[in-house]
Amino acid sequence: MSTQQIQAGDTYTADLIVDGWTVSGSVLVLSTETNQGTRYALVLAAQGNNPTSSTRWMHARGRITGPDMISFIDGGNGLNAIQLRSKTGHLPADEYAYELGQAAGSINRRYGPVGEGPVGEEGLASLAAKTRAIQDYKDCVEEAVEERDDLIRRLIAGGVPVKDITAKSGLSRERVYQIRDGRR
């Protein structure tokens, strides 16, 4: 397997090297990018066979250091490296857009952008992928807000007290009434 073959959407069985221990797991490659000649991968790694349905998973960004190895200086959660074993499939971008948005947010808050200094034209593909991921994430959030607002209107219509709705949603009383009345 060559590093050029590791692409966003690829899924693999893998050995996760965590704090010196090796754990069998799976990996979904959320994105890849090149910065000053070094390839990086943003991954969702999980113990078990399916990273998107596992309850024990982690986001990590690492450097692709070999044909089947991703290394982490500080992968979070003790992740040191991922040894990719075999490719198990490829997911279309819309099937992992939510995970990509979550991972990008948590990784960038923790580490900031990959690399330093100027990036040449090779960064344009990464820019396009990140722009698509942001839009996909915004679409998911917009849909969730619409569903939440509809549920709030139905709860009020069903006689649930606004104070209970504010307690469960974290929204202010004023915002709940704005949603009820269709304002903003």
Image (cartoon, helix red, strand yellow):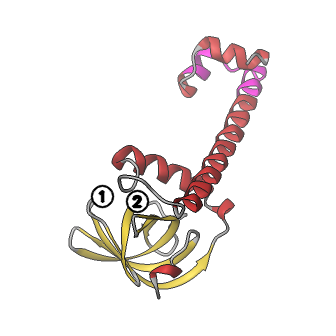
Residue 161 in sight from this viewpoint: no
Whole-percent x, y for residue 174 in the image:
63, 11
- Marker disc for residue 150: none
Q: Badge 2: few (under 14), some or many (20 or more) residues near its Cα, within 10 Å?
A: some
Q: Are marks 2 and 1 in contact (CB under 8 Å)?
A: yes
- Marker disc for residue 58: 2
What residue would you read off at disc 1? 77
Q: Badge 1: few (under 14), some or many (20 or more) residues near its Cα, within 10 Å?
A: few
The answer to whether 11 is drawn above or below residue 31 in the figure is below
Residue 184 forms part of the magenta stretch: no
What is the secondary structure assignment of the residue under circle 1? loop
Residue 159 forms part of the magenta stretch: yes
Closer to the camera, 164 or 54?
54
Whole-percent x, y for residue 182 in the image:
79, 19
Q: Residue at x 48, y 51 (%)?
A: 104
Quadrant in the picture for the C terminus? top right
Q: CA distance from mark 2 to mark 1?
A: 7 Å
Give the residues in magenta. Answer: 152-166
The quarter of the picture where residue 155 lies is top right
- 3 relative to 174 in the view: left or right: left
Q: Residue at x 60, y 58 (%)?
A: 129
Amino acid bearing label 2: Met
Amino acid bearing label 1: Asn
The answer to whether 70 is drawn above or below residue 99 in the figure is below
Majority secondary structure of magenta residues: helix
